Image (cartoon, grey):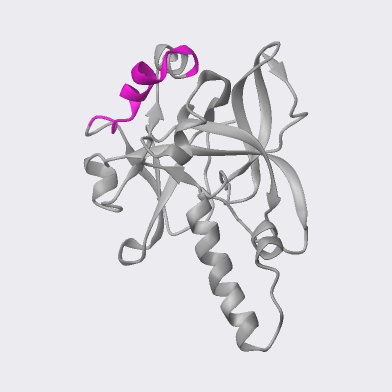
Amino acid sequence: MNRYVGNLAPMPGVFPDYKAPIMRNGAKGRELATARWGMPSSSKALMDATEKRAEKLQAKGKTVDFKELLRLEPDGGTTNIRNVKSKHWARWLGVENRCVVPFNSFSEFNKAEGGDIWFALDETRPLACFAGIWTNWTSVRKVKEGETTNDLYAFLTTEPNAEVAAIHPKAMPVILTKPDEVETWMTAPPDEALKLQRPLANGALRIVARGAKEDPAGPPA
C-alpha cells in the first residue's frame, strides 16, 4: 500500500470536519491518505441555508448577490450516508470514489445512558473498517478559511443491530470486519458492493466505554 500520511499520531477521537486516515483506490494502487470528515452536502441543503442567510441580510437592509452568497455558503459536510439511491450520492459510488475508514471503536450519543457510548468488536478493540466514499471538492468549509479544495470522506449507515439500537435506534455505521468484505467494497460493481449496507449481527459489538468524547483506553500498544 502507498502511504501518504507520514507518522500518524494516536487518534482517540475523530470529529466532523477534521482529518482522519482513509484507504482508497489510487492511480498506483491502494493508498492510505487523510481526508476531512464530511462529504459535500446536497445542493438543496445549501440552497435552503443560503435562502435563510439572504433573508436575514435583507431584513437588515443589505443588498444580496444571491449567486455569490450561494457559492460562499459554508458547508461543514455530511458525515454519514444512508440513502444511496439519491442522485447526490450516486455519482460517488464507483470504485474510484470508494474508501474504507479504519477504526478501533466508535461512539453514539445518548444522554440518558451517560453521554458518548463507545462500541468495539471486543474489549481489545481490534481493527475494523467503515464502508465509505470520498471525493476532492472545492467549497467553503469554514467562513474563516474561505474557499478551499480538500479530500473529503463520509461513511455509509444502515439499520442498527441490537447493541447499537439500545443506544441509538436510528442507525449504525456500515462495518466491514473481514478482508473479503473490504475487497468487495473496494472492487465490486455498485449493486454487489451495496449489499454490504447492512447491520452487523446481533452480539457482534461490545460497549467498551461510556461518557467520554474520546475512547479513554484505545487498543493495546
Residue 49 drawn at (x, y percent): 54, 66
Q: Is residue 125 visible?
A: no
Where is the N terminus found, in terms of image quarters? top right
* Residue 94 located left or right of residue 169: right
Where is residue 95? Give x, y as percent: 52, 19
**Residue at 68% in and 57% down:** 71
Q: Which residue: 63% across, 33% down?
A: 21
122 or 129: nearer the viewer: 129
Identify which residue is drawn at 67% across, 54% down. Answer: 141
Left or right placement of residue 34 versus residue 205 in this view: right
Toward the bottom, the furthest residue is: 60
Asked if residue 25 is positioned above or below residue 121 in the image, the reply reads above
**Camera-nearest residue between 161 and 209:** 161
Give percent across and percent down for residue 2.
71, 15
The image quadrant where one finds the C terminus is: top right
As for residue 108 lying within the magenta part, the answer is no
Q: Is residue 186 shown above or below 9?
A: above
Tell me residue 200's x, y (percent). 29, 31
The magenta-colored residue range is: 186-201
Dividing the picture into quadrants, the one containing residue 85 is top left
Q: Is residue 198 magenta?
A: yes
